[in-house]
Image: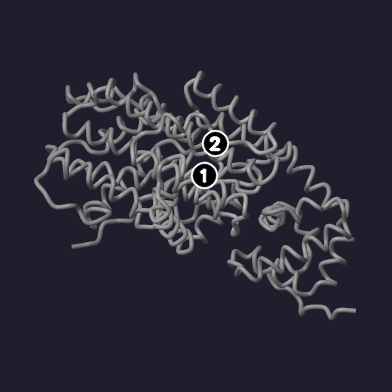
Amino acid sequence: MDPAPPRPAVELGKAGWLAALLDHAAAEHLAQGALVSAPPGPPGRARARAYLRQVIRESGLLYGTPAMRAAGASASANRPPGERLFLAVAGTFARIALDVATLAGAPGGPRREQSLALFAALCGLWEEAEGVSKGLARGEPPTRRQWSSVEQALEQRALSLSGDRAFGLVLHNGAVCADANAFGRMAVDFFVRGDLQVTFARRRLEACGRQKAVLAEVLTALVCAERRPSLTSRRAILRQIEDLRLPAEQERQVIRSARSAFGRRRPGLPERLGQVRSAEMKRFILEQTLLGSLVDGRRSGAELAFVQALADRLGVSRPELAAFELGVAGFYRRNRDVVDVFTVSAVAGAMGDRLFASMKGGVENNFRRLLNEIRETGEMSVLLSKAARGHALGPDEKRRMREQLIDLARAVPALAIFAAPGGLFLLIALSRVLPFSLLPSSFRDDPPPPLERR
């Protein structure tokens, strides 16, 4: 028997990409089974929900980075890093829906089209979600317009969230986790009941919005606890809050809270924390805050104090907090290369085209001085070349790189931004859009032997 022909690659933005992604997910689900070992018990809601809690944690969705096999990973191998990550997330969502259908004991059905209804609900497209679900009950396939509407809504989500740790908040991870929980619970409701109940789906999405709102306020307070954010950082944070697409009143409250934190010397914990009651929500907030404090590779005294105050406010004991810290640090250490790749690709979008163009102009205008300084610092040439080619730098290499960037900023003041935390990633990202003729030789494919220091 001849092997099945390879499925076409999934290209975000190309009509039909969502159907292709769901086909990949169905094929992999058939070949590989569930993403993680299913908990014991008879089919039904309890088993499906227990599996959902387990898969969000073990798949990496808790941290916004699927580390396991996912439909999006195999379907988009040649796409840009940010697109690959988004498709891996969406593909993992689709796989979860298929697993939940099996564990809930749902009868056979058009799983691809049922998943379309769930993605429509996740995007708040209630007319499309209900229309697809009712159409399937009548044996009618979704229309081209319904597919297109959901694809466009998902594309906007792919472009909106930034994992930028240098200029904004580490919101991508928590937003993905909240979405995964909402999507999975919608899937449980859908496959247990046999159709999509908009009332229940709305409640799931509202709870997801509350999670994101609390997290945005806490992460803003974390950033402000260490130092008052710059104007660029404040703009990036406000933009990220808007990109969460919260209900209008909820968004206004979060923005007010952020602006209040910007103006305080030492902002306290957000008042909204008083509304947090469930152990699951407390754990979510703490784990995402820990990730936000770890992602730049260092933890200041102010960050440590903030995390401890947050744990005390939520009623989490020291041993429990230590266990959370070990879990977050362990996952991040094992998957840092994936997280870093996404961050680099998101930097330019988070800063805005105008700022990025200004930085590009600064490098071009000071190119000769920059090249001379890089040549004088032989190690910097080696490290930049290594990083620009996609190789991960070790902690000691990153420390030396930062020290040399600071020296470079003293020699070329216009480039001082590269010496800021995260500056290495900015320089690498910028190197990929500079005209080839302007790049130092150490960035080219076949670098000459290092020049001797004078």
Q: Is residue 393 above or below residue 162?
A: below
Q: Is residue 170 above or below residue 441?
A: above
* Residue 18 located left or right of residue 220: left
Q: Which mark is residue 385?
A: none
* Upstream in sequence: badge 1 or badge 2: 2
Q: Quadrant of residue 18?
A: top left
* Residue 339 located left or right of residue 298: left
- Quadrant where the C terminus sits is bottom right
The answer to whether the residues at label 1 and label 2 have Cβ atoms under 8 Å apart is yes
- Residue that numbered label 2 is attached to: 269
Name the residue at 19% across, 41% down: 101
> How dense is the environment of label 2, judged by Cα within 10 Å: few (below 14), some, or many (20 and up)?
many
Q: Amino acid at mark 2?
A: Leu
Name the residue at 56% across, 32% down: 241
**Colouring mode (rainbow / by chain / secondary structure / one colour):** one colour
- Say which of 285 and 182 sits in front: 285
Name the residue at 22% across, 56% down: 37
Q: Amino acid at mark 1?
A: Ala
* Residue 115 located left or right of residue 331: left
Q: Is residue 42 above or below residue 278?
A: below
> Element type at marker 2?
loop
Q: Position of residue 108 (x, y in %)?
A: 14, 39
Q: Quadrant of residue 348?
A: top right
- Residue that numbered label 1 is attached to: 309
Q: How many marks?
A: 2
Q: Position of residue 263 (x, y in %)?
A: 70, 31
- Quadrant where the N terminus sits is bottom left
Name the residue at 56% across, 29% down: 242
Q: Position of residue 436 (x, y in %)?
A: 75, 58
> How dense is the environment of label 1, judged by Cα within 10 Å: few (below 14), some, or many (20 and up)?
some
